[in-house]
Image: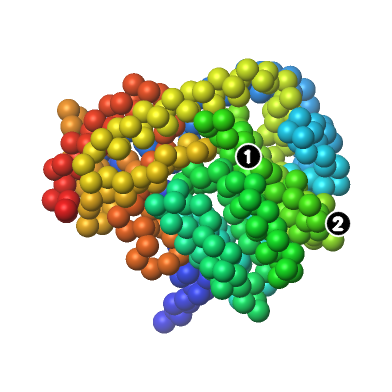
Amino acid sequence: MPTTRKLSSRAADLPASPIRRLAPFAVKARAAGRKVYGLNIGQPDIPTPPEILGRLKTYSDPNIPYGPSQGTPEFLETLQSYYGSCGLKVGIEDLFVTTGGSEAILFVLGVIADPGDEVLVFEPYYTNYSGFAALLGVVPVPVTTPAEKGYHLPDRAVIESKIGDRTRAIMLCSPNNPTGTVYTDREMELLADICRKHDLFLVADEVYREFTYDGLTHRSALTLPGMDERTIVVDSLSKRISVCGLRIGNVVCRNKELMAAILKAGQARLCPPTLGQHLGAGLMDVPASYMTEVISEYEGRRDLVFDALSAMAGVSLEKPEGAFYVCARFPVDDADRFAQYMLEEFHHNGETVMMAPAEGFYATPGQGREEARIAYVLNRNDLTAAMQALAVGLSSYPGRF
């Protein structure tokens, strides 16, 4: 008889994405004729700038060849100019282009940690951190941020209590996915001081750098003094100019040894997308007015969603400061069951809502069970209709308390 081979323990440890897990239920709902407002995933509906899409017509090579593992010179120079426009001085040698921000995270974790090593993460956190860590055998150690304080960092003693002999880094995301929190200068400086004291890397996910509201500004980890050898920024074009499917991200780090290791990882996968970099090289041609208008639009969407959720009895939340997500606690027995109910059993005038249950954004068992993340990435008319459907669905949900 043929032998049935088991998969690796790594395969068993891989977590399912709470962002995409409910997708089959949405497919069935749409097949049944319902309109599903997709608020589960950070896919902007804002049009990609014509300065980017127009470069499709300027591609003149007879085929699409492999490019350099680090990235094409044209796109690397574009990135250098972009960071310069943000007040961040980086050299070409400090940049490495990746296949989306996802590969940037995977490469960074792979070169700073061995299997069994630990990385501190502030929960709730971007759920895919757990997936990448599981692939590499790296252990994410959660530090819970309290919802009632807007998911800002806990006291220093709480953070340091999580640091052990196998801790290699602290990982953060600001502006934050999934909470919309923007860490203050004081918080960023605190983390830098902890990293210097305990000889740790600081991995900063700055994908939502521009998305801040109410006059707040983002403090890049690249500006922290005495941290050049320790700071690693992972970044992406995806949200900035609405090119999620382009799959172009990058690493920024001034540590030459680390970047040499990243290069070896990049050589193993050959190169990042050649055509994607050609389009991305138009980044500096996009007028500043584009981002100004995008931020204004998202701020208005945030206010609409925040006001609507705040008006729902029993729902508790803090106003997001950036990105385009909000985490809310619902008066339900289980947010995952509630989200599935909205797709399987409920509709309001033929319409319903798809959310991302927040338990998967936590590593601590039981945390986030009553929370869900909502991405306000639809136009305001659709968001208004979605909030109406959500309010009716919440009032009719059998597991409401």
Report the residue marked by disc 1: 218
Q: Eyeballing the image, is 246 above or below 268? A: above
Of residue 82 and residue 219, the one placed in the foreground of this image is 219
Q: Label for residue 256?
A: 2
Q: Position of residue 397 (x, y in %)?
A: 16, 47
Q: Name the image quarter holding residue 107.
A: bottom right
- Residue type, label 2: Lys
Q: Position of residue 283 (x, y in %)?
A: 71, 27
Q: Quadrant of the N terminus?
A: bottom left
Within 10 Å of the Cα at label 2, are there few (<14), some (14-19), or many (20+) other Cα atoms?
few
Identify the residue shown where x is 55% and y is 20%: 293
Identify the residue shown where x is 70% and y is 49%: 221
The residues bearing labels 2 and 1 have C-alpha atoms spaced at a distance of: 26 Å
Q: Does residue 258 appear to the left or right of 168 in the view shown?
A: right
Q: Assess whether mark 1 and mark 2 are in contact (beta carbons under 8 angstroms).
A: no
Q: Position of residue 93 (x, y in %)?
A: 86, 47
